[in-house]
Amino acid sequence: MPTMNYLTTCQFDFGAIKGLGPALRRLGVKRPLLVSDAGLKAAGLIERVIAEIPDGPAAVFDTAPINPSEAACRAASDAYRAGECDGLIALGGGSPIDLAKGAGLAVSHEGPLARYGASQRGSRHIGPIPTLIAIPTTAGTGSEVSVGAMVILDDGRKETIISPHLIPSLAICDPELTLGLPAGLTAATGMDALTHCVEAVLSTMVHPPAEAIGLDGVERLFARGWLERAVADGSDREARWQVMMASFQGALAFVKGLGAVHGLSHGLGRLADLKLHHGTLNAILLPHSLAMLAGHAEEKLARLRKAMEIPAGADVAEAIAQLNARIKIPPNLGAIGVRTEHLALALDYAVSDLATNSNARKFGPAEYEELFKRAL
């Protein structure tokens, strides 16, 4: 099976989960805390992973919320201490993995998580956290190989926490674990991965290797049709492999930054009453954000068209919108419960979000208001 070193080591292939026991021994972890969620418990995946841990986990935290919160990070860190744990295993999508990162930060650092947020230039305060092995069960966020975690703080703010110390020591990407993913979640997480690749390519930061990886991810998901195949037939093993690879690539690519889609998605994702899915938000917002780039980033848009294998001069935004329709992404923000008054609650967070800084064109309150109205 391929082993790739980029930000961290990744064991990637069907059956990769069998490498968990040897990895724990190699990393010196004897009493791990397993972090996951109730859905994966019900699906039997937690027990499947526990079977690969030589002496079982010292503790299990299986109540990760849909959007990781500071309170949940504290609860997981309490479980870590109570179990006298010496490492972490995160099983799930971006939420359990980000929660495990937050818990690792909480057990190894003092003070509230706000101190470590990107908006406070908190990275300088972050040192090593306990050994973390990340095992994704969706193909979208790429949190298993990323430097960041998204956490809703006690004050309600959705904060990005970024540090190389948050990169898991090992990612185990086993497409077998995604075979039971429903079509709707496959579509939403797959579009999350595509958004990562597209926004990374368009980002104003200079990082040619990451940009090349993003373009390959776009080709894999869009031009080769692997995302549509995975949505149409969840048992299609090659499609599952390819979509998980594109998700991995998306996280490798977005080391060069993201853009306004993520800025507004993060702002709306903090609204506790809606509990919006991050990938669904990204999918809905992406074509509208691309439409607002007319006259900007034309050279990079031309490279995206090549990767997507659509004609020169074709409307990239419309091509993405058509893909959304084919895989049954909700047509607009209104369809997932967003209302006009939610903009006021999300706007300041979007403008100040780290992703906004690397958007392909400058976005302030007026531009975000236009994006919101287009997508509503």
Image (cartoon, rainbow, N blue to C red):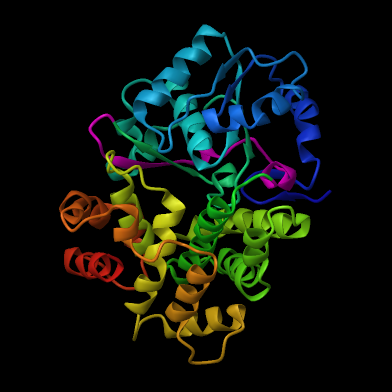
Residue, x 61% and y 78% (percent of image)?
307
The image quarter containing residue 29 is top right
Point out the stretch of residues depicted in magenta: 154-179
Report x, y in % for residue 249.
62, 58
Residue placed most toward the observer, 15 or 114: 15
Q: How many marks?
A: 0
Please say if 52 is above or below 332.
above
Residue 171 magenta-drawn? yes
Q: Is residue 46 above or below residue 310?
A: above
Hey, which quadrant is residue 222 in on the image? bottom right
Left or right: where does residue 7 sit relative to residue 331? right
Q: Position of residue 162 (x, y in %)?
A: 43, 43
Placement of 229 over or under 276, stated as above or below:
below
- Left/right of residue 118 with respect to residue 92 in the rendered view: left
Image coordinates for residue 71, horizontal then vertical, percent: 35, 24
Q: Quadrant of the C terminus?
A: bottom left
Q: Is residue 271 left or right of residue 80?
A: left
**Residue at left offset 67%, top offset 29%:** 44
Residue occupying image coordinates x 65% and y 44%: 8
> Closer to the camera, 267 or 38?
38
Residue 316 falls within the magenta-colored stretch: no
Image spot of residue 31 (x, y percent): 65, 14
Reply above or below: 318 against 282: below
Residue 204 in view of the camera: no
Residue 182 in view, yes or no? yes
Q: Is residue 111 left or right of residue 166?
A: left
Q: What residue appears at the point 25 percent right and 53 percent down from the top-left corner?
A: 352
